[in-house]
């Protein structure tokens, strides 16, 4: 009789554990794969849910139009951008309205409720860096981190902030996001908001070229090309060769 009671106790404990595991798996599956529906993109109200956004920089983009200011948006479309030392803008995109945007897929992110529930291949590394269970949580963590960082156009800038967010999200299963591939992602895949945005981005550059050729001649184009190559070289060098240069 005693052995039956013990066996019965074990069975009931096992049943409870099985029921808990099934319920726990169901809840984590819901966390990982069910997302709130996003509102439509509304450029007039500056709402770009789960998007990267880009706008040209004064003077710098006039000389090198591939360089601009980048931000990332919450699920409700609010823009966040690192635009000054110890300061992350909220819903006030620095340097003007967004000219380009790229909406990202939340399904391509890793939102582990615990260390054993990663959908990415990084697991412990992702947890140590700072994983989150929602898109907005990841952005909030990066925001708090960059509120203690000094802004520098050449070493720690808006692209660094966006890269940090994407690494926390482990977007597309990668934790190797940096200034270069963030810029490349939005430059190659981003969509223009409208025709005026294209004009706003390239018209000053064309004016500078025409003015420079008229005033200086063709050597101006050579100098401008060298300037662009030096900028690209600096960012590539700091990103892939001497990584400590661009550590935030």
Image: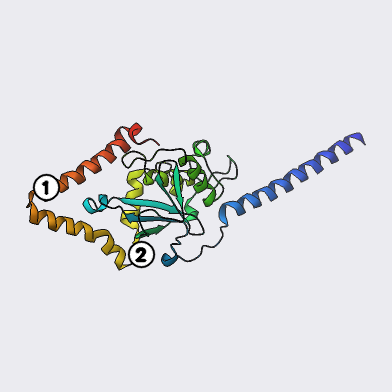
In the rendered view, would you say 45 is above or below 147?
below
Residue 110 in sight here: no
Looking at the picture, tell me which residue is in the foreground, 126 or 60: 60
Q: Return the disc, 1 or 2, that comes first in the chain's sequence.
A: 2
82 or 245, which lies in front? 82
In the rendered view of the protein, which quadrant contains the N terminus? Answer: top right
Residue 195 x %, y %? 30, 67
Query: x, y percentage for residue 102?
Result: 39, 58
The color scheme shown is: rainbow
What residue is at 43 percent from the left and 52 percent from the top?
72
95 left or right, relative to 169: left
Quadrant in which residue 114 is drawn: top right
Decide which of 180, 107 is in the foreground and name it: 180
Secondary structure beneath label 2: loop
The residue carrying mark 1 is 222
- How many discs mark residues in the rendered view? 2
Q: What separation in Å lies between label 1 and label 2 (alpha carbons)?
A: 32 Å
**Is residue 207 depicted above or below 17 in this figure?**
below
Numbered circle sitting on residue 98: none
Name the residue that disc number 2 marks: 193
Residue in the picture at 40% in, 38% down: 150
Q: Does residue 146 appear anywhere in the picture? A: yes
Tell me the quarter of the image containing the C terminus: top left
Q: Residue furthest right?
A: 1
Q: Nearer the viewer, residue 173 or 104?
A: 104
Q: Residue at x 43, y 43 (%)?
A: 164
Left or right, 93 with reference to 130: left
């Amino acid at each position: 009789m005693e052995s039956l009671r013990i066996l019965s106790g074990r069975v009931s404990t096992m049943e409870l554990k099985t029921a808990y595991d099934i319920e726990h798996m169901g809840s984590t599956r819901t966390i990982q794969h069910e997302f709130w529906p996003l509102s439509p993109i509304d450029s007039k109200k500056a709402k770009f849910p789960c998007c990267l956004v880009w706008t040209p920089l004064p003077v710098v983009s006039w000389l090198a139009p591939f360089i601009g200011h980048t931000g990332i948006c919450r699920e409700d479309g609010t823009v966040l951008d690192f635009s000054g030392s110890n300061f992350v803008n909220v819903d006030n995109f620095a340097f003007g309205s967004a000219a380009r945007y790229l909406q990202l897929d939340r399904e391509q992110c890793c939102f582990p409720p615990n260390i054993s529930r990663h959908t990415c291949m990084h697991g412990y590394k992702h947890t140590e860096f700072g994983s989150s269970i929602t898109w907005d949580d990841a952005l909030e963590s990066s925001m708090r981190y960059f509120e203690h960082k000094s802004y520098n156009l050449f070493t720690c800038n808006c692209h660094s902030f966006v890269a940090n967010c994407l690494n926390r999200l482990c977007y597309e299963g990668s934790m190797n996001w940096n200034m270069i591939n963030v810029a490349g992602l939005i430059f190659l895949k981003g969509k223009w908001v409208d025709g005026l945005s294209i004009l706003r981005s390239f018209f000053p550059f064309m004016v500078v070229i025409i003015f420079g050729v008229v005033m200086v001649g063709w050597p101006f184009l050579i100098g401008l090309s060298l300037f662009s190559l030096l900028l690209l070289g600096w960012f590539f060098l700091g990103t892939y060769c001497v990584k400590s240069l661009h550590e935030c």
